[in-house]
Image (spheres, rainbow, N blue to C red):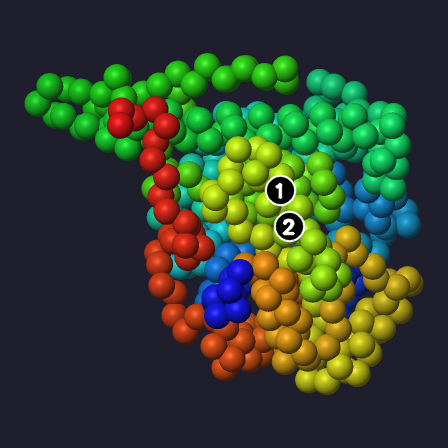
């Protein structure tokens, strides 16, 4: 990514923030977490900061301190429960105008047909600002909620174990097939399929609807969708990746991938590996944004940011750690880091506010002006769709005649 390119910026929203004790701070609105107004307020603040898009977290199980374990008594200090991310985004959409909305969807136990319809609907409700963050589930207790399959105990630390690696690969291969089915369903209506010819009584041209006849070892989807092709043609598909197997999913299937480097050198190495996987997938030269992910504790001084993290750690009873790099410092110091990552080849970042509203406001009212002052961020929204904000064209329909 050229150093003169504007930096893209996303914000990851999750309850009261990414620190498990964030809901206990005086400024947190813990009593409003399950209200629509809470989410509208957060996304409107992000839009005031001209952020490209927000992601909204979701899961099939209650929040837990460990990947492989159902939430227990030791997690009683955490926020428990979530609203459905897709429905939350659809509630927020009419009350915003430019910012993209990217809810998380677990693809392991859900159906491609339902997801395609839900995200296509979100794209209509938002007039072209929808995306989706696809995620897999290797948790046995989440499989038990559906009762259609069994997943053996899986520990992330054992992902290189010869007994565990094939299971992980299979989950991500299934996710790639899922995304392909979803994308074909979005294309199953040509753009002009709805002709609305009152004189002849024909609302749609049946010849412009297509069976997708998609078949994999996990599912079969005949199609077509019941929802017309979304305004963006293809809403944005994103994925979080920490290692080679999920990098491969992103390289095959996504428009944007979130990665978790610890420094510029690691960012450069990850970006290079993803491009190699993209070449191997036959997508060389196709647009694929690589965003760095990090948790942020921001304050007027680095000491104040570190002290605030320490106070939250005391409330939680343990030091906060994350799958992503944890930054404590000032907006100016964070801007230095983000521009270093841009120089390493990343086109954007997704920031996880440690505590809301404090760190969200520090992003929109501290970091954004800092980046703008350095000529590294927009002064106004330059497009009306999420793909447009990210410089992505509206793709042609694969089923339409050339």
- Is 9 displayed left or right of 258 in the figure? left
Question: Quick check: can you spot residue 291?
Answer: yes
* Label 1 close to label 2 by CB (< 8 Å): yes
Disc 1/disc 2 C-alpha distance (Å): 6 Å
| Residue positioned most to the left | 199
Foreground residue among 335 and 304: 335
Percent across and percent down for residue 100 are 46, 54
Q: Quadrant of the C terminus?
A: top left
Question: Quick check: can you spot residue 32?
Answer: no
Q: Mark 2 highlights which residue? A: 272
Foreground residue among 95 and 139: 139
- Is 63 displayed left or right of 391 in the figure? right
Q: Mark 1 highlights which residue? A: 276
Foreground residue among 263 and 75: 263
Q: What residue is at 42 percent from the left and 38 percent from the top?
A: 234
Mark seen at residue 141: none
> Mark 1, residues whose alpha carbon is within 10 Å: few (<14), some, or many (≥20)?
some
- The image shows residue 95, relative to residue 168, as above or below, that is below
- The image shows residue 58, relative to residue 35, as above or below, that is above
Percent across and percent down for residue 179 are 54, 31
């Amino acid at each position: 990514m050229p150093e003169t390119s504007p930096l893209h910026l996303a914000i990851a929203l999750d309850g009261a923030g990414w620190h498990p004790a964030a809901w206990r701070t005086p400024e947190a609105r813990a009593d409003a977490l399950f209200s629509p107004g809470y989410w509208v307020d957060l996304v409107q603040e992000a839009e005031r900061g001209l952020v490209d898009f927000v992601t909204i977290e979701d899961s099939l199980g209650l929040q837990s301190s460990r990947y492989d374990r159902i939430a227990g008594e030791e997690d009683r200090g955490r926020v428990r429960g979530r609203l459905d991310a897709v429905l939350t985004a659809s509630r927020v959409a009419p009350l915003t105008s430019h910012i993209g909305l990217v809810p998380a969807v677990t693809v392991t136990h859900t159906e491609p047909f339902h997801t395609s319809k839900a995200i296509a609907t979100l794209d209509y409700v938002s007039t072209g600002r929808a995306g989706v963050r696809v995620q897999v589930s290797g948790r046995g207790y989440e499989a038990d909620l559906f009762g259609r399959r069994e997943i053996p105990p899986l520990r992330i630390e054992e992902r290189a174990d010869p007994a565990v690696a094939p299971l992980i690969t299979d989950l991500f291969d299934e996710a790639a097939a899922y995304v392909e089915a979803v994308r074909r369903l979005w294309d199953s209506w040509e753009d002009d399929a709805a002709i609305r010819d009152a004189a002849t009584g024909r609302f749609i041209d049946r010849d412009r609807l297509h069976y997708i006849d998609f078949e994999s070892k996990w599912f079969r989807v005949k199609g077509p969708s019941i929802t017309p092709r979304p305004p963006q043609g293809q809403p944005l598909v994103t994925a979080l990746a920490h290692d080679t197997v999920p990098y491969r999913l992103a390289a095959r299937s996504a428009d944007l991938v979130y990665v978790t480097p610890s420094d510029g050198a690691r960012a450069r190495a990850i970006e290079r590996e993803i491009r190699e996987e993209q070449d191997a997938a036959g997508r060389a030269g196709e647009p694929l944004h690589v965003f760095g992910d990090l948790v942020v504790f921001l304050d007027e001084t680095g000491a104040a940011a570190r002290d605030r993290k320490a106070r939250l750690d005391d409330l939680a009873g343990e030091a906060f750690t994350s799958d992503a790099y944890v930054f404590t410092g000032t907006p100016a110091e964070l801007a230095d880091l983000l521009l270093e990552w841009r120089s390493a080849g990343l086109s954007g970042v997704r920031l996880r506010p440690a505590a809301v509203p404090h760190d969200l406001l520090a992003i929109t009212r501290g970091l954004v002006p800092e980046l703008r002052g350095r000529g590294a961020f927009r002064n106004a929204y330059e497009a009306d769709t999420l793909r447009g904000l990210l410089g992505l064209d509206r793709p042609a329909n694969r089923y339409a005649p050339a």
